[in-house]
Structure formats: structure tokens, C-alpha cells
Amino acid sequence: QVQLVESGGGLVQAGGSLRLSCLASGSIFSFKAMGWYRQAPGKQRELVAAITTGGSINYVSSVKGRFTISRDVAKNTVYLQMNSLKPDDTGIYYCNAAKSRGAMTQDYWGQGTQVTVSS
């Protein structure tokens, strides 16, 4: 059973920084991609950043230049460095891991970590 454990959320003032961590229960190379999603109150969950096994990275446009996704393979951990935070970045951030199952993809989710940015 895959387990993803997030940490690093909290309350920060606008302009501040936070670093989120996602510890996977196995090798992160066992997933075809890992990423961070967020869900703000009353809104749908959206992809914030993702990194594939091959190292390709993409970001939602609203965080480009401010957020950086990275990984430490030896520690089975994916990070999200968030700088220049804005109140609109507030939400619950979820770690996601996508594993290939034949022609299909199975998604795994962490429990979420709250990020609150005050103005």
C-alpha cells in the first residue's frame, strides 16, 4: 500500500515562504509522476506542480517563478518550495503520486497540509 505523508504547511504572511515535503513509502521512481495539488475553500482541486520520472516539470501559470518542485530520490521525498506567497495561495495542499497500472493510471493521495497566507 502506497503512503504519502505531507508536512511543512502553516500560516505565513504575504510575501513569505514555506517548503512542503512529501515522503513516499517507497521509491519515488516507482511512480510515473508526482505532484502537488491544492484546494481552496469553495473551489475545485487544481494541479500546482508536477515532476515526471524523467524529470519533466510543469507548473500552473499562477505559481510560475514563485514555486519550485524538486525531489530527493535517496529520501523518497518530493518538495514544493513556495516563495512570494500570496493570499490566493491559501488552501489545502495535497501530494499526489501517479502509478501506471497497464494502460491505466492509479492515483495516490496524501492527507493534505494546510497553507494559509495572510494579507
Image (cartoon, rainbow, N blue to C red):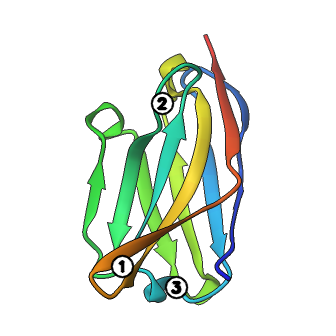
Neighbour tally class for label 3: few under 14, some 14-19, many 20 plus, Cα within 10 Å: few
First of labels 2, 1 by sequence position: 1
Residue 71 in the figure: left or right of residue 48: right
Q: Quadrant of residue 15?
A: top right
Q: Tag 3: residue type?
A: Val
**Is label 3 or label 2 in front?**
3
At a point 48% along the width and 53% down the height, the residue shown is 36
Q: Position of residue 3 (x, y in %)?
A: 69, 74
For the N terminus, the quadrant is bottom right
Q: Position of residue 40 (x, y in %)?
A: 55, 26
First of labels 3, 2 by sequence position: 3
Residue 25 in the figure: left or right of residue 64: right
- Residue 43 is marked as none
Q: Which residue is mark 3?
A: 73
Q: CA distance from mark 2 to mark 1?
A: 29 Å
Q: Which residue is mark 2?
A: 84
Q: Tag 1: residue type?
A: Lys
First of labels 1, 3 by sequence position: 1
The reply to whether the C-beta atoms of the residues labelled 1 and 3 are less than 8 Å apart is: no
Neighbour tally class for label 2: few under 14, some 14-19, many 20 plus, Cα within 10 Å: some
At a point 52% along the width and 85% down the height, the residue shown is 73
Q: Position of residue 102 (x, y in %)?
A: 32, 88
Q: Quadrant of residue 35?
A: bottom left
Is residue 52 positioned above or below 47 on the image?
A: below
Q: Position of residue 48 (x, y in %)?
A: 40, 45
Please tell me whether mark 3 sits on a helix, a strand or a loop. Answer: helix
Please tell me whether mark 2 sits on a helix, a strand or a loop. Answer: loop
Q: Which residue is mark 1?
A: 32
